[in-house]
Image (cartoon, rainbow, N blue to C red):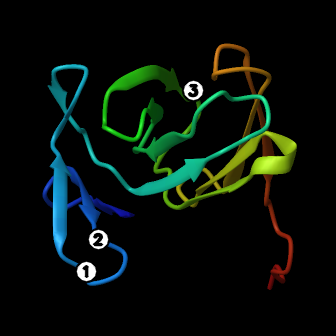
Amino acid sequence: RLFVADADNGMILVLDATNGSLVQTIRTVGGRPFKTPRGVSIVEAPAMSSPLLIVAELQRLLLLDLQGDLKSEIAVPGSEAMLGITNDDQADAVYVGDPGANKVHVFEWSEEGSDVNETTADDDDHGEDDA
């Protein structure tokens, strides 16, 4: 399966990875509509007993099972417009870009997302010249 964030329509599309056909749409989470899903990643970390679908919205992360049921919600204070997500399963970490805040948020956990720690990497002027 292929999971795609559709921010314009406020949903996650689940496609068949072999032929691209629509398998499922996930429009709500915890009985509420998505705010603005802007990135998805499947996490199969050693500390987790089953894979999770991580959805990045503007100012929160949602941890869902692969059927779309909410497992946890993480507010991200200081975020402005999270966009894009990737993960390192071996390190039990998820990285979320936040161009609005000029940061990369790093989330790490020990088991089932219950012990989540966040750190941020600021990009004040790396690679840019002040002219």
The N terminus - image quarter: bottom left
Disc 3 from disc 2: Cα separation: 35 Å
Q: The residue tagged with tag 3: helix, strand or loop?
A: loop
Kind of residue indicated by mark 2: Asp
Q: Are marks 2 and 1 in contact (CB under 8 Å)?
A: yes
Q: Do the residues labelled 3 and 1 touch (CB within 8 Å)?
A: no
Comparing 89 with 49, the one in front is: 49
Q: Residue 77 carries which label?
A: 3
Q: In this view, does 71 lie to the left or right of 15?
A: right
Question: What residue lies at 58% left-to-right and 33% top-to-bottom?
Answer: 50
Q: Do the residues labelled 3 and 2 touch (CB within 8 Å)?
A: no
Relative to 95, does residue 123 appear above or below in the rendering?
below
Q: Residue 20 carries which label?
A: 1
- Can you name the residue that lies furthest to the top here? 114
The C terminus - image quarter: bottom right
Q: Position of residue 106 (x, y in %)?
A: 74, 42
Disc 2: which residue = 16
Comparing 86 with 25, the one in front is: 25
Relative to 69, does residue 5 appear above or below in the rendering?
below
